[in-house]
Amino acid sequence: MLNEYDCWLQKRKIASNIKAPETVFIQDSLSGETAAQAVKEFTSGIQRLLGFLPKVVSLPVEQETAAKENAVLLGLFSGFEKYPSFPAAALSNKTAESFIIKVTGAQIIIAGADEAGLLYGVFRFLNLLALGEIKDGFELIDSPVSPLRMINHWDNFDGTIERGYAGGSLFYKDGNFSYDRQRIEDYAQLLASTGINRLSINNVNVRAKAKLLITEEYLKHVGELAAIFRPFGIKLFLSINFGSPWSLGKLPTADPLDPSVLEWWKNHTALIYKYIPDLAGFIIKADSEGEPGPFQYNRTHADGANMLAKALTPFGGTVIWRCFVYNCTQDWRDKNTDRARAAYDHFMPQDGDFADNVILQIKFGPYDFQVREPVSPLFGALKKTRHVMELQITQEYTGHQIDLCYLPTVWEDIMNFDTAFSDTDKRAAIKDLIASNKKDYPNIEGFAAVVNVGLDNNWCGHTLAQANLYGYGRLAWNPAVTAEEIADEWSALSFGAGEAAAKKVKEILLKSYGAYEKYTSPFGVCFMVTPNTHYGPSVEGYEFSRWGTYHRADKDAIGIDRTPSGTGYTNQYSPKNAAMFADPSTCPENLILFFHRLRYDYKMKNGQTLLQNIYDTHFEGYEEAENMIKDWKALKDSLEEDVYKSVLSRFEKQLDNAREWRDQINTYFWRKTGIDDAKGRKIYE
Ligand code: GCW
């Protein structure tokens, strides 16, 4: 049975394969609040899963207690040097946040390279215990592959959330901070349990009153929030507005090269750090969709970012600078401007110009979190600039947490994308490029993702959308984890390891992305969605708008030619990928309409025309949505009634949505072409 508020940290008595760890010995040198949190998580976790509260005893570091029965030892690697049974591999592991779990007889050791590592070790141990994987002889040494594992909130000061589908903000209401301390702590626990270590707490569109967030009146609240997240190893970022020197400081300009502007930021940053001494830094959306930025002063992004970096340097802070920069006032008549080119065209020429404490944040694809986009050509190409990949957990274009859409499916594809920048070094897939920053190397330092949580009791609106939040944390920790492994873990943690319901839910999750893609916009066509809300079909909703997202369907053909004979976007990729994408016969078919303008009678690999494939996918996608409901209904007797019903009602709405998509798309193309479905299914006239 599932208590939806608890997500994957269910209170559920499990059958354990190990002796009950009755006493917890902690190294007496552990003094920090993250270590204290780790101990607390361990004891409460044992109570949650095994039904008793272990006794906690402090232990001098040098005391050998390896022989103690039914004991757990929690500490840092450094404190275990004298323990003969402690694996040497862990002692030499200096990677921050790593941990070891080792079970021998009745003794369990959980140790971290640092306190955060210990906390992650405890959470992993508890999950593995719940999954039935902890047994005598178990040993795991693990380190995060990505140093930066960040969550972005797009929460507004009035309590709404931009692109939020799970209730109001956890942090704000009616123009002020307003939060339930316990709820924030529970949230921090959920995030830390998946390995998240950074969090931005306000929308990147810093508008109206949100500009005041960095003034003294509100900074004290930011300080209070930072204090709640701190024991969980989570540091905060603040979204800031580039125009602050004039909007807040009343300076005549925000020109990054004007000395008075730098001076203002230096003083103001010092003020911010008075309240939050360990603030991780600033995140900024500049020159993007109306937000101010250096372009207003004829300065470059590097000028803007480096100025802020200077202000943050004395405090060890970082600037995260978003690359979502494109012309959002395009004329649809203009076929020469290609929005897909924008991020690369703006940022690639500046590779190497950014200060050491600047990190570029790049959306995974060149557009905007569409159901299927190619991976941004900046990945693998940038070599001298620190950068991270931005994903979207909140389902802006993927069904608003009404439709089930298990995102790790597409994230896995992204991780496996081979940037093909190196013929000699095989480490060229995205998942192989995730690593710490190294000079002159195309490493991606990790991930940021727009979160899907709000005040709803189940956090995510759709209970099964919790899998996306969990999945993001797991994948940010280790991008080589597969969608199936994550689905397996999450379903078992949530619905009970070995339960039939867990198995079924896993299957449903794994089918959901494909279904959504099929009934909405297969073949990488993008933006056939209702303008502004981004839920439901509107085939030409963006055709004559200013956003640069067109498919240009006419009676014969559809898609944008992005090859060298078109916009030339394909040339932003490595030569191997440029050639692969530019040729329709080698371009992956799930992206073919992103790269090519094709006639409806173009023969796809299955021998059918493009048009017939459009019809087929939409009929199939709808059927798959129907099947998901059937699968869910079969679980009626094994689930909590409230969970069963709330998910069922979402599946019902999803089916309506799938029907609209299927019929509007099919009718649209039938009207354009007058060509019937070869299989004679119903297409409305
Ligand atoms: O996709 C667009 C969204 C905006 C968002 C923007 C961004 C925060 O529709 O709501 O603004 O992306 O990423 O900045």
Image: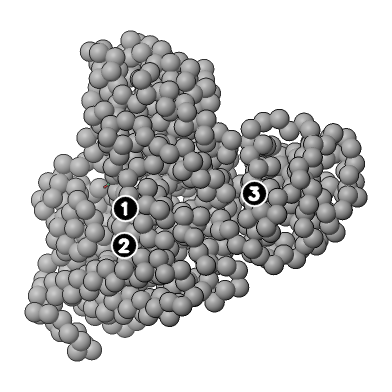
Residue named by callout 2? 402
Q: Ligand 1 quadrant? A: top left
Name the residue at 84% across, 57% down. Answer: 106
Labels 1 & 2 near each other (Cβ < 8 A): yes
Give the number of marks: 3
User: Is the distance from the Cβ of mark 1 to the nearest ligand 1 atom less than 8 Å?
Assistant: no
The local secondary structure at tag 1 comes to loop
Q: How far apart are labels 1 and 2 at the CA level?
A: 8 Å
Q: Is residue 377 left or right of residue 47?
A: left
Residue hosting label 3: 44
Q: Quadrant of the C terminus?
A: bottom left
Query: Could you tell me how far apart the alpha carbons at marks 1 and 3 are, in whole angstroms?
Result: 31 Å
Residue mark closest to the camera, 1 vs 3: 3
Front-most of 658 and 317? 658
In the rendered image, the residue lying farthest to the front is: 52
- Amino acid at pointer 1: Tyr
Residue pictured at 75% horizontal, 66% vertical? 17
**Secondary-structure class at tag 2:** loop
Question: Which comes before the other along the chain, label 1 or label 2?
Answer: 1
Q: Which residue type does callout 3 highlight?
A: Ser
Assess disc 1: are there few (<14), some (14-19) or many (≥20) residues with their C-alpha within 10 Å of its C-alpha.
many
Residue 566 image position (x, y, % from top left): 23, 56
**Number of residues whose C-alpha sits closer than 10 Å to that of mark 3, classed few (under 14), some (14–19) or many (20 or more):** some
Looking at the rendered structure, the secondary structure element under dot 3 is helix
Q: Nearer the viewer, residue 602 or 565?
A: 602
When asked about the image quadrant of residue 323, the answer is top left
Q: Is residue 291 above or below residue 167?
A: above
What residue is shown at x 64% (from left), y 49% (from top)? 44
Which callout, 3 or 2, points to the residue nearer the camera? 3
Q: Is residue 9 above or below residue 320?
A: below
Q: Which residue is mark 1?
A: 165
Q: Is residue 635 left or right of residue 520?
A: right
